[in-house]
Image (tube, rainbow, N blue to C red):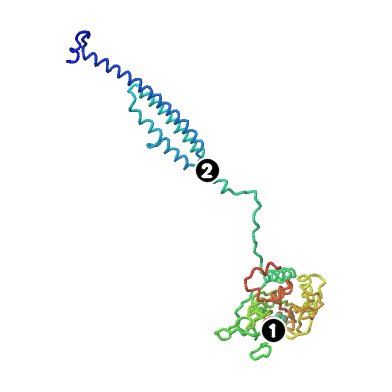
C-alpha cells in the first residue's frame, strides 16, 4: 500500500485489488489476442498438412510407401501429432475448434490412406496376375509321343496278315524241355542237326531256354489233335550266340503251323507268297530254295528280293539281291505222329521267321543290337 500514499497530492487512491483486476484483464486480453494468432496458425498448419499429405499420398505407389507416408503424417511421431502438441497454448474455448478440425483432417487422411491402399493392393494384385497369367490362346507345345518298338510293329503286321488268313495266335512257353525243343522235333540226343541251335542250358537237367518257337508246334498239336490246325506261335527265343550286328542272344520268332487232311506244298507257297506281298508290298519277287530242317520234309528257305536295293545288290543283301525271309517245309511224318496225328491221314506245313530280322530289313537298320539298347533315336528313323 505504501506506494500509493506517496503520491497522495494528485493521485486518486484506488483500491489495489481493482487495479490488479484491470491489469490482469489487460494481460488476459493480450493473451487472448496472442492465442487467437496461435489458433489461426495451427489451423493453417493443419490445412497445409492436409494438402501436403494428400499430394504425398498421391505419389505413394507401393504399400511400403503408404506405410512411410503414415508414419510421416499420422503416426504418434508424425506431423499431425506434432502440430497438436501446441494445443496446450490454446484457451479452453479455442481448443474444441482446433480439435474438431484436427479430427476432420485426420479422418480425411485416414480415409484417403485406406482408399490409396486399396487401389495399390488392387494394382499389385493385377501385376501379380499379369505376371503369372497363362495365355490360353498360345499354341501348345507339341507333346513328344512315344512309338511302338519296331519289332512290336513287325509282329502286329504279321498277326494282322495271318489272322486274316484264318490263323490263330497260340502262346507257348519260353522255358522248354530238351524233349520238346529237340526230340519231338525229330532230333534225338546226339543228332548232328542240334548243332544248328547253340543252346542255353539250365542247372535242371533237361530244362533249357527254347532255341526256336518250333516246340510250340508240338504243344498246339497235342492240344488240338485230331482237329485241323491253323496257328501262328510268336515269342522270344534264346541262343548262346556270339553277339554281332545280325545276331543277338535273345530274339523273336513267329512260327506257323497248318495241319489238315489235304494240305500240300502249294498251300505253303500260296500262304507265304501272300504273306510276303502284304508285308513288303505287292509284286516284290520271292524265291524258294531247297534246305534242311529235321522237322520238315521237304524243307525250303524263302527269300525276298532285297528291300533296300530292289535286287541290284547292296551291303545289306551281301550283293546277292536277296534276303532270307524264313525257313519252312512240310511237317515231317514223325513230328505229326509226336503231335498225335496219323501221318497217313494228315499232312501239314510249318514255317518260322524272325520278326526282328524282318524289321531290320524293312527299315534298313544295320545293327540288331540297337533293338535292345533303349536309344529312342532308333524310332525317329522309321
Ligand atoms: N525253327 C527254325 C529255326 O529256328 C525255323 C523253321 C524252319 C521253323 C522250318 C519251321 C520250319 O517251322 O518248318 O531256324
Q: Residue at x 62, y 71 (%)?
A: 374
Viewer-nearest residue: 44 or 374: 44
User: Relative to residue 115, is residue 91 drawn left or right?
Assistant: left
The dot on residue 371 is: none
**Ligand 1 lies under 8 Å from the Cβ of mark 2:** no
Q: Residue at x 38, y 37 (%)?
A: 77
The residue that label 1 is drawn on is: 335
Query: Which corner quadrant of the image does residue 329 belong to?
Result: bottom right
| The image quadrant in which ligand 1 is located | bottom right
Label 1: state its secondary structure: helix
Query: Which corner quadrant of the image does residue 144 belong to?
Result: bottom right
The N terminus lies in quadrant: top left
The dot on residue 124 is: 2
The C terminus lies in quadrant: bottom right
Q: Residue at x 20, y 8 (%)?
A: 9
Label 2: state its secondary structure: helix
Question: Which of pointers 1 and 2 indicates the residue nearer the eye?
Answer: 2
Mark sitting earlier along the chain (1/2): 2
* Percent of width and height locating residue 182: 65, 85
**Ligand 1 lies under 8 Å from the Cβ of mark 1:** no
Whether residue 322 is situated above or below residue 42 in the rendered picture: below
Amino acid at each position: 500500500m505504501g506506494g500509493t500514499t506517496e503520491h497522495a497530492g494528485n493521485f486518486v487512491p484506488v483500491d489495489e485489488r481493482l487495479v490488479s483486476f484491470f491489469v490482469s484483464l489487460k494481460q488476459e486480453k493480450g493473451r487472448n489476442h496472442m492465442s487467437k494468432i496461435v489458433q489461426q496458425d495451427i489451423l493453417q498448419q493443419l490445412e497445409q498438412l492436409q494438402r501436403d499429405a494428400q499430394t504425398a499420398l498421391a505419389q505413394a505407389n507401393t504399400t511400403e510407401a503408404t506405410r512411410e507416408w503414415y508414419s510421416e503424417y499420422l503416426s504418434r511421431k508424425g506431423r499431425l501429432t506434432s502440430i497438436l502438441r501446441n494445443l496446450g497454448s490454446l484457451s479452453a474455448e479455442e481448443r474444441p475448434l482446433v480439435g474438431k478440425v484436427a479430427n476432420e483432417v485426420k479422418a480425411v487422411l485416414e480415409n484417403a490412406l485406406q482408399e490409396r491402399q486399396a487401389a495399390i493392393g488392387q494394382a499389385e494384385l493385377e501385376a501379380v496376375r499379369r505376371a503369372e497369367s497363362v495365355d490360353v490362346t498360345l499354341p501348345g507345345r507339341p507333346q513328344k509321343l512315344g512309338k511302338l518298338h519296331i519289332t512290336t510293329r513287325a509282329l502286329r503286321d504279321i498277326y494282322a496278315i495271318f489272322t486274316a488268313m484264318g490263323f490263330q495266335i497260340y502262346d507257348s512257353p519260353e522255358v522248354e524241355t530238351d524233349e520238346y525243343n529237340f526230340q519231338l522235333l525229330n532230333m534225338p540226343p546226339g543228332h548232328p542237326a542240334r548243332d544248328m541251335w547253340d543252346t542255353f542250358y539250365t542247372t535242371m537237367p533237361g530244362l533249357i531256354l527254347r532255341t526256336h518257337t518250333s516246340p510250340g508246334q508240338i504243344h498246339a498239336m497235342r492240344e488240338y489233335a485230331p482237329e485241323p490246325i491253323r496257328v501262328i506261335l510268336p515269342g522270344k527265343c534264346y541262343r548262346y550266340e556270339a553277339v554281332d550286328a545280325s545276331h543277338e542272344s535273345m530274339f523273336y520268332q513267329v512260327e506257323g503251323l497248318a495241319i489238315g487232311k489235304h494240305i500240300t506244298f502249294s498251300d505253303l507257297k500260296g500262304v507265304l507268297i501272300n504273306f510276303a506281298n502284304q508285308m513288303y508290298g505287292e509284286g516284290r519277287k520271292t524265291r524258294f530254295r531247297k534246305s534242311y530242317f529235321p522237322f520238315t520234309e521237304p524243307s525250303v528257305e524263302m527269300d525276298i528280293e532285297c528291300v533296300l536295293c530292289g535286287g541290284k545288290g547292296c551291303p545289306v543283301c551281301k550283293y546277292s539281291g536277296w534276303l532270307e525271309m524264313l525257313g519252312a517245309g512240310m511237317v515231317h511224318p514223325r513230328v505229326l505222329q509226336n503231335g498225335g496225328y496219323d501221318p497217313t491221314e494228315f499232312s501239314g506245313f510249318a514255317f518260322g521267321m524272325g520278326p526282328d530280322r524282318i524289321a531290320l530289313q524293312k527299315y534298313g537298320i544295320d545293327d540288331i543290337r540297337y533293338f535292345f539298347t533303349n536309344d529312342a533315336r532308333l524310332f525317329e528313323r522309321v
